[in-house]
Image (cartoon, rainbow, N blue to C red):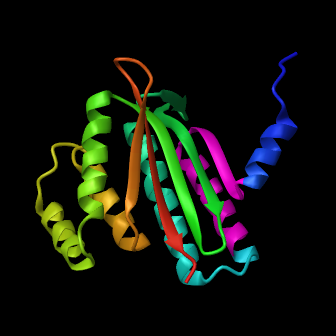
Amino acid sequence: MDNFDVFEFYQFMQRQNVILSFKGEMSQQILVNIGDLLKEKLASEDTEKQVTKKVFFIFVELAQNIHRYSADRGIEDKKRAGTGVLFVKESANYFTIFAGNRVAPLEAKVTTEQCLAISRLTPNELKLYYKEQLKQPREDETSGAAGLGLISIVRKAENPIVAYTIDIDTNETFLVLSVQVNKE
């Protein structure tokens, strides 16, 4: 039998105030179910409606990034779905939404640089940049789509998006994105 200590893992999640976590394939159906669960959890804690909407929106955007861009792919309903991890932590003043998945090193570099650049923009600059990006031609469904999603996340959160990477090997990097949503 495996020596994995489930209780220790549970206690760690409790200490970190993790209110929702998921690891696996980000299929559309799973995303809908987990999103509904997140909304119910926030509503049961009397979280302000605007805050709930922001947390939900960011959660969905980050899940879609995993679905589209993760190098770790699974099959869900005969379609390829990205695999990763998503979780939401709560603190006294804010919620933090985290997403992590495997990507190619170049993609990780581009995404972290993009997050840094987007997070430096003022709200007005973000709005203008978003409008500029909407006008850019798209070669396919994944071309440039992450840029719009990342911009939308920062605009909605009204906080920067933090990105960092952990090298797995020369072909893969684990990319982590996180963003805070203030409770007030």
Q: Residue at x 70, y 69 (%)?
A: 40
Q: Is residue 158 above or below residue 10?
A: below
Check the picture and name the quadrant holding the N terminus.
top right
The one nearer the camera, 97 or 92, is 92
Q: Is residue 65 above or below residue 126?
A: above
- Residue 35, by quadrant, is bottom right
Question: Is residue 24 on the magenta stretch?
Answer: yes
At x 43% / y 57%, what residue is drawn? 61
Start and end of the magenta stretch?
16-42
Closer to the camera in the image, 2 or 83: 2
Determine whether, in the image, residue 8 is placed left or right of residue 180.
right
Q: Residue 99: x, y in percent?
A: 50, 47
Q: Residue at x 33, y 58 (%)?
A: 149
| Residue 74, position as x, y percentages in the image | 52, 28
**Where the C terminus falls, by quadrant?**
bottom right
- As drawn, is 56 to the left or to the right of 128? right
The image shows residue 16, relative to residue 122, as above or below, that is above
Task: Give residue 69's quadrant in the image.
Answer: top left
Question: What percent of the width, then of the height, locates residue 23?
Answer: 62, 39
Residue 130 falls in which quadrant of the image?
bottom left
Tell me the residue at 78%/39% (across/down). 9
Front one among 89 and 60:
89
